[in-house]
Image (cartoon, rainbow, N blue to C red):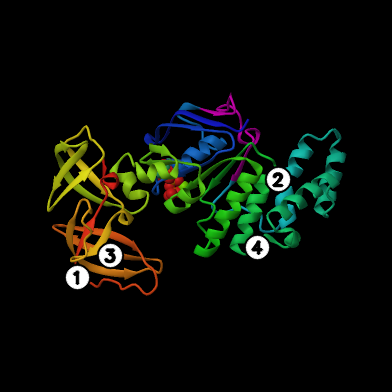
Amino acid sequence: MGSVKVDQLTKEFAGVKALNNVNLDIQEGEFFALLGPSGCGKTTTMRCIAGFEQPTTGTILIGDKAVNKIPPNRRNCGMVFQSYALFPHMNVFENVAYSLNIKQLNSSNVISQAGIYLRLLNRKFGKYPKDIEKKVMEILEYVELDRYATRLTSELSGGQQQRVALARALVMEPAVLLMDEPLSNLDQKLRHSMRNTIRRIQQDLGITTIFVTHDQEEAMSMADRVAVMDHGEVMQIGTPTDLYSRPATPFIANFVGTSNMLKGTVVDEVDGLSIIKGDGFQLRSSQTSTKKEVDVIIRPENIKVYKADRVPSDASNLLEGDIVVSTYLGSIVRYDVQIGNYQLVVDTTYSSGESILAAGEKIKMSIEPERVLLI
Ligand SMILES: Nc1ncnc2c1ncn2[C@@H]1O[C@H](COP(=O)(O)OP(=O)(O)OP(=O)(O)O)[C@@H](O)[C@H]1O
Ligand SMILES: [Mg+2]
């Protein structure tokens, strides 16, 4: 069973709380991301699950078994580190075979010292038992590195090294795969293609995966569910769309995607819509709030832009503003628009041939009440 439960986990380092009451319930086969800014406790959470750190309080369960007292090598977790931690003096095959080899030697029936020594010597000269050889070559083929089996890992590109690290974790057939910022050393393009590779392998094998990242795009594009962490605590857990469309706090709204955040006061409720007033704006929202003073969150792509004389008659939540900056980004045009004391970010889809509004132009904007989020 590859489910993982983290129950009321707290970790203190020399009196400083790195984790405060972290609770996670990760399903078997799930791709689960831990997302948060530097220092929020992602690695510490993962190291507690792997067994490299001992919780100050709390319980870790893998399957239905509490593993607090079980050493890392018996937790059935495969780990991929940010730095890959490969052996530079070994070739690709040897790196991947290493743990399998140790495991087989440990469980070996050979009782004499001489027998074990002979086996070690054989392997030093590249003679591995057929079953190890078969398994390693299969996994290398799987990550498309079979051609590089005899190459030293120090002679590989970053992306290739990353795949060796992945193969080395997978060859042990772990119940849980733990990955700590595995893509952060790769350039942008490679990172994108490795995201797809990792996701494909994870789905193929149905392996429970916990993936640590501080890159929201990475978490949102890969994971089934994401836990957003801050200052040692889990702030919200949800699917990527949950987090994006219903962020629980302004911090999450800001961390997960770009958002416009306005301070407002709920002044009335009319026809099931909340009326919010703020500095230089009035908006209607389909959400209700238990608080009077609210943070109003509007995603840039949910704001429609019109030239001042071309506003459709049914446009809701009309706002007027001045374009401050206009940026062409290929498939979208991003406008920074001044309304009162606020500068809003507005993204409009762009088709070739369309004209782009310029800085200094006066525009009107509209927002559907369903897209005006209140926190
Ligand atoms: N061995 C340690 N001794 C003392 N403090 C530690 C230790 N390991 C982590 N910490 C502290 O615990 C907090 C959480 O650290 P952690 O490494 O889990 O953060 P992180 O979310 O992985 O950050 P990053 O994105 O920078 O890797 C930090 O304040 C860090 O300084
Ligand atoms: Mg870390």
Assign a secondary structure to mark 3: strand
Left or right of 163 on screen, residue 255: left
Residue 361 is tagged as: 1
Assign a secondary structure to mark 4: helix
Mark 1 neighbour class, 10 Å CA radius: few under 14, some 14 to 19, many 20 or more: some
Range covered by the magenta-colored residues = 60-79
User: Relative to the observer, which residue lies in front, 360 or 34?
Assistant: 360
Mark 2 neighbour class, 10 Å CA radius: few under 14, some 14 to 19, many 20 or more: many
Q: Residue at x 42, y 44 (%)?
A: 241
Q: CA distance from mark 1 to mark 4?
A: 56 Å
Q: Nearer the viewer, mark 2 or mark 3?
A: 3
Q: Nearer the viewer, mark 1 or mark 2?
A: 1
Mark 3 neighbour class, 10 Å CA radius: few under 14, some 14 to 19, many 20 or more: many
Q: Nearer the viewer, mark 4 or mark 3?
A: 3
Occupied quadrant, residue 108: top right
Q: Amino acid at mark 2?
A: Val
Q: CA distance from mark 2 to mark 3?
A: 49 Å
Occupied quadrant, residue 227: top left
Picture layout, residue 239 above or below residue 335: above
